[in-house]
Image: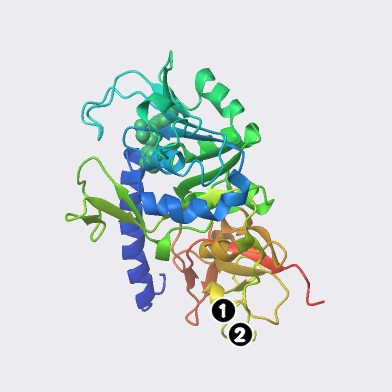
Amino acid sequence: MANKKDKSVSHEETKSKNASLNKAILEKDGEFYTQLNDIENEVNNYKKHLKGKVIFCNCDDPRVSNFFHFFSYNFERLQLKKVISACYKSDDVEHFTRKKSRTASYLEYEGDKNRNRIPDPEEIGIKKFKGDGDFRSEESIKLLLESDIVVTNPPFSLFREFIALLVRHKKKFIVIGPIMQATAKEIFPLIMTNQMWLGYGFNAGNAYFKIPSPKEFAEGVYDVTTGLVKFRNVTWYTNLEIPKRNIEWVLWKSYNEKEFPMYANYPAIEVTEKKHIPCDYFGQMGVPTTFLQVHNPKQFKIIGSCGTLAKPIAKIAPPGTFSPGGPRFYLKNKDRTYRRLQPRLIIQRVDNGN
Ligand SMILES: C[S@@+](CC[C@H](N)C(=O)[O-])C[C@H]1O[C@@H](n2cnc3c(N)ncnc32)[C@H](O)[C@@H]1O
């Protein structure tokens, strides 16, 4: 039996059920439209990277998207070279953009020509795709090759494939994606090897999106007055250097065996909250995936995750003493049962105490 006394487990289970429901809806329905202020808050941190660059917003719908709006209205301030926004064809009449045409098209904007500081319709080139505008299509990849930086919010169900395409074509990006995908087998190796990382993220971790129609979201997610859904399980990913990556995470707690026990199925200590990483421990430590928000590669190296490092608990513990499931770290309880933990990353100090 797993430890039933632990109240935090049942709270975590409820949270995790809600998260799974929201994740399922997120992945099923690709139509989530990012708020202008969220785009502004993130993209303004990359100003020096954007200067003189061609920006590509694929997986977009320029008729309703705030990405095209943001880049075209801030074109001169950001000193951009060109903005391309590509729209995917949809035959689904229930789609958010009912006015959506059934052919896919893309827009190109190269700045204000008549000096009124507004992107006028005659300054925006509208071109039709021959195909459906899928980001994996030849036509869309041609636009990708012309561009320098991809900035968008792709369908979450295709996030891994989307990132793989950008990496394959050596493109820079600022892209929204599910936090949980940070440990996906296609994404985590890129994070471990410093080929991509988390951006600044949403204000207080709350991402608001406009959706086609209210769905059966878990409690507290859909707001009827604003028509927005709030998700805490998405973030910005990038491979552009940002000052945030050089900030040292302040460590102040001292290590002790009681507070930082060793896992039963991997030789690392459990650190339940990233703010409690001990300042005087130099071995391997397991931390929640939220650690990625503050990761500075000069301070810590990422060794792996429970997904690949955890030894099967069934090889260590007798049947009935643990909750089974996919690979996770476990802690041994006093009553000889084992407590299954939420996903953890294994990190280690770079300086080894020197
Ligand atoms: C999450 S929405 C985001 C829209 C917009 N980028 C925003 O944040 O406001 C994802 C968009 O990708 C489009 N899309 C879905 N599948 C696609 C595909 N295979 N290729 C390109 N775009 C796709 C959807 O139609 C939708 O407009």
Q: Residue 4: in sight, yes or no?
A: no
Label 2 residue SS: loop
Tell me: 190 left or right of 337: right
Image coordinates of residue 72 in percent, x first then y, are 44, 38
- Quadrant containing the N terminus in the rendered view: bottom left
Determine whether label 1 and label 2 are within 8 Å by CB.
Answer: yes
Alpha-carbon distance for marks 1 and 2? 6 Å
Q: Which residue is mark 1?
A: 276
Tell me: 205 left or right of 148: left
- Quadrant containing the C terminus in the rendered view: bottom right
Image coordinates of residue 189 in percent, x first then y, are 64, 48
Q: Is residue 353 above or below residue 96?
A: below
Image coordinates of residue 140 in percent, x first then y, are 51, 23
Label 1 residue SS: helix
Q: Residue 263: in sight, yes or no?
A: yes
Residue sitting at x 38%, y 26%: 88
When asked about the image quadrant of residue 312, the answer is: bottom right
Label 2 within 8 A of ligand 1 by Cβ = no
- Whichever of labels 1 and 2 marks the residue nearer the N terminus, that label is 2
When asked about the image quadrant of residue 349, the answer is: bottom right
Q: Amino acid at mark 1?
A: His
Taking the view exactly as shown, the residue that stands out farthest to the top is 130
Q: Looking at the rendered structure, which numbered label has been put on residue 253?
A: 2
Residue sitting at x 43%, y 58%: 202
User: In front here: 346 or 133?
Assistant: 133
User: In front here: 261 or 322?
Assistant: 261
